[in-house]
Image (tube, rainbow, N blue to C red):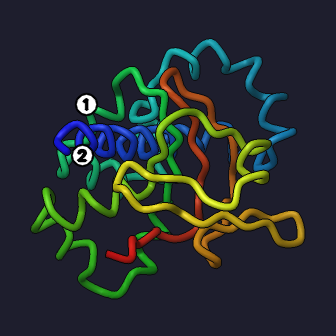
Amino acid sequence: MKRLTWLGAFLILSLILVACGATEEPTATPEPEMAPTEVPTEEPMEEANSIVDIAVADGRFTTLVAAVQAAGLAEILSGEGPFTVFAPTDDAFAALPEGTVESLLEDPEGALKDILLYHVVNGVVKAEDVVGLSAAPTLQGEEISISVSDGKVFLNGNVQVVITDIVASNGVIHVIDAVLIPAA
C-alpha cells in the first residue's frame, strides 16, 4: 500500500511539473499537432526536464506545484516514472469553492494527497492513446472515466483536456480545465 501511495504521489508531482512546463509549448501550440512544431527548438530542454521541472517553469501551475510539494510528492513525480499527469491550472484550482485549497493544504497527507494522486496514471498515455480509452486507473486507486465528444476529450464527464502531450523526461502532461475529485 505504501508503494502505491508513493507511486501515486510521484505521478501527481509529475503532472504538476509537466503542467508548469506546459506554458512554453501549450501557449504556442494548444493542439497536439502544433506542439511538435515547437518541440524541435525546445525538445532537448524539455526531454531533460521532469514533470515537476516543467510544471515549476511554466508559471500556470503554481497551486499544483505548491500542493505537490506540501503532499510530499515532488520527489516521486521528479523520479524515473514514467507517469501521465492530468494537470489542472491555477484557474482550475481557483474555480473550487472558496477555502477548499486552504483546507486541503491543512491535511497534505490525507485528502490533498489522494486528490493529487487521482491526477496521475502510471505509464505514458499520449493523446492518441487517451482517445481510445474509456477509463484509466490512477495512482490513487480509482479510475478516471474518459470520453470523446465533438473531437474533445473529457475526464469524468465534464473536465476537458485542453492541452496535450507535453513531454517530460519521466512521462507526459495533459493540461485540464478543472480539478478532478475522486469519489471516495
Quote the CA–CA distance across marks 1 and 2. Answer: 13 Å
Q: Is residue 27 above or below residue 99?
A: above
Per the image, the residue denoted by label 2 is 5
Q: Which labelled disc corresponds to residue 75? A: 1
* 102 left or right of 137 in image: left
Residue 152 x %, y %: 80, 65
Q: Quadrant of residue 135?
A: bottom right
Secondary structure of the residue carrying numbered label 2? helix
Residue farthest toward the front in the current orientation of the protein: 1
Viewer-side label of 1, 2? 2
Secondary structure of the residue carrying numbered label 1? helix
Counting other residues with Cα less than 10 Å from the Cα at mark 2, is it few (<14), some (14-19), or many (20 or more)? some
Query: Which image quarter is the N terminus in?
Result: top left
Task: State the residue in front, 133 or 181.
Answer: 133
Q: Earlier in the sequence, mark 1 or mark 2?
A: 2
Specify the amino acid type for callout 1: Glu
Q: Which labelled disc corresponds to residue 10? A: none
Q: Residue at x 13, y 56 (%)?
A: 109
Residue 71 x %, y %: 19, 51
Q: Residue at x 53, y 63 (%)?
A: 144
Check contact, mark 1 vs mark 2: CB within 8 A: no
Q: Residue at x 21, y 67 (%)?
A: 111
* 64 left or right of 171 in image: left
